[in-house]
Amino acid sequence: MSINPVSEQADFILVGAGIMSATVGTMLKELMPDAKIIILEKLNDCAQESSNGWNNAGTGHAANCELNYTPQKSDGTVDISKALEVNTEFDLSRQFWSYLVGRGVIDDPASFIRSCPHMSFVWGEGNVRFLRARYEAMSAHHCYHGMQFSTDPAEIGNWAPLIMEGRTGNEPVAATRMITGTDVDYGTLTHTLFGHLEKTPGVQVHYNTTVSDLTRNADGQWEVSAHCSITREKRDYRASFVFVGAGGGALELLQKADIPEGQGYGGFPVGGIWLRCDVDELSQRHHAKVYGMAPTGSPPMSVPHLDTRIVNGKRSILFGPYAGFSTRFLKHGSLTDLFRTVRPANVIPMLDVAKDNWDLTEYLITQVLQSGEHQFEMLRQFYPLATRGNWQHVVAGQRVQIIKPTHEHHGGRLEFGTELIASQDHSMAALLGASPGASTAVFIALELLQKCFADRLNANDWLPNLQRMIPTYGIDLKLDGDACKNIRQQTAEVLKLDNI
């Protein structure tokens, strides 16, 4: 390896070439056109890990159908507060994408986003009661205007024929449906945004570049040490701000940065496997994303769903995911990933989480030991007439759930969402976690601006441009029904989506 590093100076360094860096980089360049941005990616192209179309759920998470966002309380009522948060966060993505269509950054929104109804589907008397209570709570709120509910097998069959055909017996069933749901190919979107960034003056994207260290210099600048995996040349990059959006690789880089705010964090990797059907005569008959109930103790990414998916223009059906365990933090990672992130500061939080999450451990062991026949039988619960030969196993992306230190108890807890960790001096931030991830990339980018660049969010600086990108910035769409209705109509027109 070369001992003479190549040094490059930038205003911003973004680590990772997925949907997060694509979104943050695009937004920063819109707000600060003269900025110099360097993006570093370990692999040879963007969107090869969790942003890849086959590696994520692709729902355009609007919390329409994901039952894990709406827990039932002890009194039988359903808490929809988390669902409302995720639902309106997706509105921010729609607004930003609409802005980019108007700017000519996105030529054809249909290249990555299409209307696709979101459904929840359950069977059994207890689950039907839960879904009815969930529907009553959600349909009463303006964010879920137009939600449908049915216990009629014939009507549900009209919505999604495959899930009802061949279903026998008198077991009660129920479903909800939102026709305003979407299917999003985040891989295509990421490639579109990077295609724009790579042509934009002041932006450099370096692929095949592995970051090995992050160090804060005496002058306040961050020095990012990396090497090219092809030439083995060592390179040093300097910037006053660094964002680590490297998916499962973010935890180790956060630890290398050694900021106090990142102390004690750990990660728990969860893998996934899909069953995929590419038979056109079947995929053309299923136009919905149908989510069911998660097994007890399972992580949110394992909520079973039978999905219409359009990736790179090809229509398929996905079922799963089935959870698995690997010590890799990335699909293209190393078996040593988990062990390299164990530190004295996070040993106790990790052991605390292990002690309190035996149901998750048991679930993962069961999933790993499942035979292909067991996995296929789970599919048949959703699609009774499924034929084994029409489905193939596809390995999905890796997710790293957050193990967050709880300083008041000197322990830790397992977090299933995402968390943006920023240094106190606002010079560095890293994104940890998984679902809902890609669907809320714009919300996370805004959170990054608010945490690290609050001094620039004023009328004399970035705020006017930010409000052009996000017209409802500063408005709570959960409370303002008129603003919610109007912006959804506007973005539906631009993005060519169904609206009610």
Image: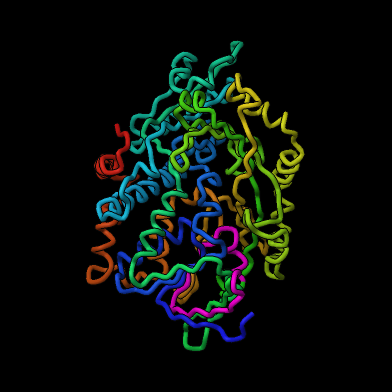
* x then y, percent, for residue 269: 66, 53
Q: Position of residue 377 (x, y in %)?
A: 68, 26
Image point (56%, 66%), residue name: 208
Tell me the quadrant of the picture where the C terminus can be found: top left
Splitting the image into 4 quarters, where does residue 34 fall? bottom left
Segment tinted magenta in the rendering: 229-255
Q: Is residue 5 visible?
A: yes
In this view, the residue farthest toward the bottom is: 218
Whether 211 is drawn above or below 69: the answer is below
User: What is the x, y in percent for residue 341?
Assistant: 68, 65
Q: Is residue 326 left or right of residue 139?
A: right
Residue 261, placed above or below residue 280: below
Name the image quarter holding the N terminus: bottom right
Identity of the residue drawn at 54% across and 32% down: 278
Q: Position of residue 386 (x, y in %)?
A: 61, 23
Q: In the current view of this chain or complex, which residue is farthest to the top?
A: 169
